[in-house]
Image (spheres, grey):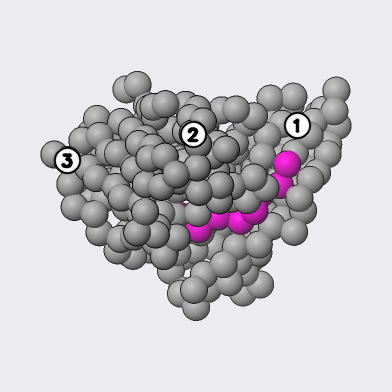
Amino acid sequence: AQTVTQSQPEMSVQEAETVTLSCTYDTSESDYYLFWYKQPPSRQMILVIRQEAYKQQNATENRFSVNFQKAAKSFSLKISDSQLGDAAMYFCAYRSHGGATNKLIFGTGTLLAVQP
Amino acid sequence: DTGVSQDPRHKITKRGQNVTFRCDPISEHNRLYWYRQTLGQGPEFLTYFQNEAQLEKSRLLSDRFSAERPKGSFSTLEIQRTEQGDSAMYLCASSLEWYEQYFGPGTRLTVT
């Protein structure tokens, strides 16, 4: 069974600075997807960024980028030029490729605080 | 596109009562998922529908839980004889085939 581990329950960053959130996962599959989701307080979860395992190039979405290390099974999220609106719970998630359900497997989350 | 909606947003019930939650997916989405999120944890998969067919149920979904998606549109999740351990946020998500899952705001259940 696949597992996702986020070892940082809480992180803090100053506005305009850069922060990196860590995620490791375990799987025996060779083809899969990895995601970072953002869950602001009392608001619904939204997708931040997606990485396909077969792609060597790290995904980037504006101020958000990932460092995908397939051999190490590591998938970190870097947020550049942090903004107050980035404060939220961030979840790393795994999904099999071509699986019957494409259900998401989530980590326990990292609560990010942004200090003005 | 109005997004995924869930009703009610909050539900307080007494132990032993039955509760039912509703999820309305994005209209063209054929896949619908239910997840449960307890405090301090990430969401955990409960069950999945493709159109009206329920294709997978997690072991977390005990016999007291039942989900339906009549006509492949909205879905309901019913919990019978609620227990305090059922207190959680119940999240619904939908997707078009294997593309991105869009989440609803969730229903927070408190069992007293």
Quadrant for the C terminus of chain A, please. top right
Q: Which residue is mark 2?
A: B13
Q: Residue at x 50, y 58 (%)?
A: A105
Callout 3 amino acid: Pro
Residue position for label 1: A82
Q: Which mark, by number, is residue B70?
A: 3
Tag in front: 1 or 2: 2
Magenta residues, as a range? A103-111
In the image, what residue occupies the spot 64% across and 45% down?
B39
Tags 3 and 2 in contact by the CB under 8 Å rule? no
Same subunit under labels 1 and 2?
no
User: Could you tell which of marks 3 and 2 lies nearer the N-terminus?
Assistant: 2
Distance from the alpha carbon under mark 3 to that under mark 2: 26 Å
- A43 horizontally vs B54: left or right: right
User: Do the residues at pointers 3 and 2 share their chain?
Assistant: yes
Could one spot residue B112 in this view of the protein? yes
Coordinates of residue A16 in the picture (x, y in percent): 81, 29
- Of all chains, the one bearing label 3 is B
Q: Dot 2, how many residues are within 10 Å of its Cα: few (below 14), some (14-19), or many (20+)?
A: some
| Chain letter for the residue marked with disc 1 in the picture | A
